[in-house]
């Protein structure tokens, strides 16, 4: 089959699968494959060579696309090829072709390090419209992902026990989580009126909020916060998850507890969201100095006794 089938045709088969269509990130997968096919769509699947994928990477980089985006596009095509191989639509040689091509982005090279100070967070919060303010506060005080927040419904929010109860189907890693609601967030959620026609927590003009990029950009500008993924030290919404992880760790919360609340299944992913800053480094040196000082004092005392 792969001797006659193009990537456009294989994509139509793959995106038409019911299991694929039910995936949470189907839309992203669809966009990545569309981009991939804009260059290699008419290529016969069985004719693809590693050089073709390397040329694809070079063309996309020349067009100004970031390494992570290019990796995601090839990754989507790789996922499609794996599925096709499992169903005997493509052979092992095509599978090897994708395995031979290395990712452009080095491991953890795109890890975010932007952390808002408490003062910056409060300044940002005060300049946001009410519906966006509640979303940003939820991200900062819970570490929840954007999709988990925007899809949150009142039946998952227990205001009596002050707990957000996410079911496996509501999370990226398909694992249920319980997230405590702190005092400031409780006050914010308490002021949100519940709609009769829609159970979503975060509504704007009667409809679930789907996008907050514009209001976030405006508020950042007013608060004097550099905003944008491609700006130096630029802030993006996802950085609020980094803030939560970092401040929880600074507060002395055990890493295992933080990982349980945020849904980080591996230590590697937790480390990506935990930022070590200058204060941490200074505190580490001070702690070492205090330890050495106490050791020296003990030695001096022992010598005097001797």
Image (tube, grey):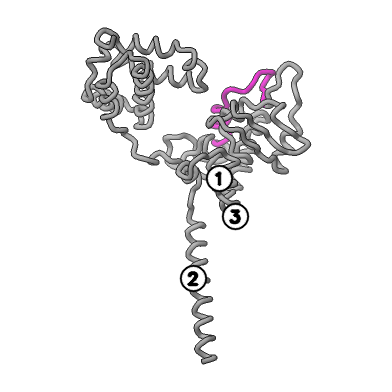
User: Which residue is painted at 74% across and 29% down in the image?
Assistant: 192
Q: Position of residue 196 (x, y in %)?
A: 76, 18
- The reply to whether the C-beta atoms of the residues labelled 1 and 3 are less than 8 Å apart is no
Q: Which residue is mark 1?
A: 245
244 and 59: which is toward the camera? 244
Would residue 217 be counted in the magenta stretch? Answer: yes
190 and 305: which is toward the camera? 305
Question: Does 272 sit above or below residue 292?
Answer: above
Which SS class for mark 1?
Answer: helix
Magenta range: 202-221
Q: Which residue is mark 3?
A: 252
Which SS class for mark 2?
Answer: helix
Question: Does 94 sit above or below residue 295?
Answer: above
Q: Which is more N-terminal, label 2 or label 1?
A: 1
User: Which residue is painted at 24% across and 21% down in the image?
Assistant: 93
Q: Which is more N-terminal, label 3 or label 1?
A: 1
């Amino acid at each position: 089959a792969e001797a006659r089938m193009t990537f456009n045709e294989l994509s139509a088969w793959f995106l038409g699968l019911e299991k694929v269509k039910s995936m949470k990130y189907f839309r992203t997968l669809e966009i990545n494959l569309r981009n991939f096919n804009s260059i290699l769509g008419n290529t016969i699947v069985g004719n693809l060579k590693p050089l073709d994928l390397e040329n694809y990477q070079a063309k996309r980089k020349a067009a100004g696309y970031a390494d992570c985006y290019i990796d995601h596009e090839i990754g989507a095509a790789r996922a499609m090829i794996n599925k096709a191989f499992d169903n005997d639509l493509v052979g092992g040689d095509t599978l090897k072709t994708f395995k031979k091509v290395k990712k452009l982005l080095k491991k953890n090279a795109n890890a975010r390090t932007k952390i808002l100070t408490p003062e910056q967070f409060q300044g940002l919060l005060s300049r946001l419209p009410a519906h966006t303010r509640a979303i940003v506060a939820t991200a900062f005080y819970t570490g929840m992902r954007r999709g988990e927040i925007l899809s949150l419904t009142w039946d998952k929010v227990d205001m009596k026990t002050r707990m957000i109860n996410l079911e496996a189907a509501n999370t990226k890693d398909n694992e249920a989580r319980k997230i405590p609601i702190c005092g400031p967030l409780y006050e914010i959620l308490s002021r949100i009126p519940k709609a009769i026609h829609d159970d979503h927590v975060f509504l704007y003009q009667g409809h679930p909020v789907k996008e907050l990029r514009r209001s976030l950009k405006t508020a950042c500008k007013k608060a004097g916060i550099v905003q944008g993924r491609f700006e130096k030290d630029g802030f993006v919404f996802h950085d609020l998850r980094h803030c939560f992880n970092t401040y929880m760790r600074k507060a002395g919360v055990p890493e295992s507890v933080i990982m349980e609340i945020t849904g980080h299944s591996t230590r590697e992913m937790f480390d990506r969201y935990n930022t070590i800053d200058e204060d941490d480094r200074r505190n580490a040196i001070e702690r070492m100095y205090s330890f050495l000082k106490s050791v020296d004092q003990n030695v001096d005392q022992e010598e005097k006794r001797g």
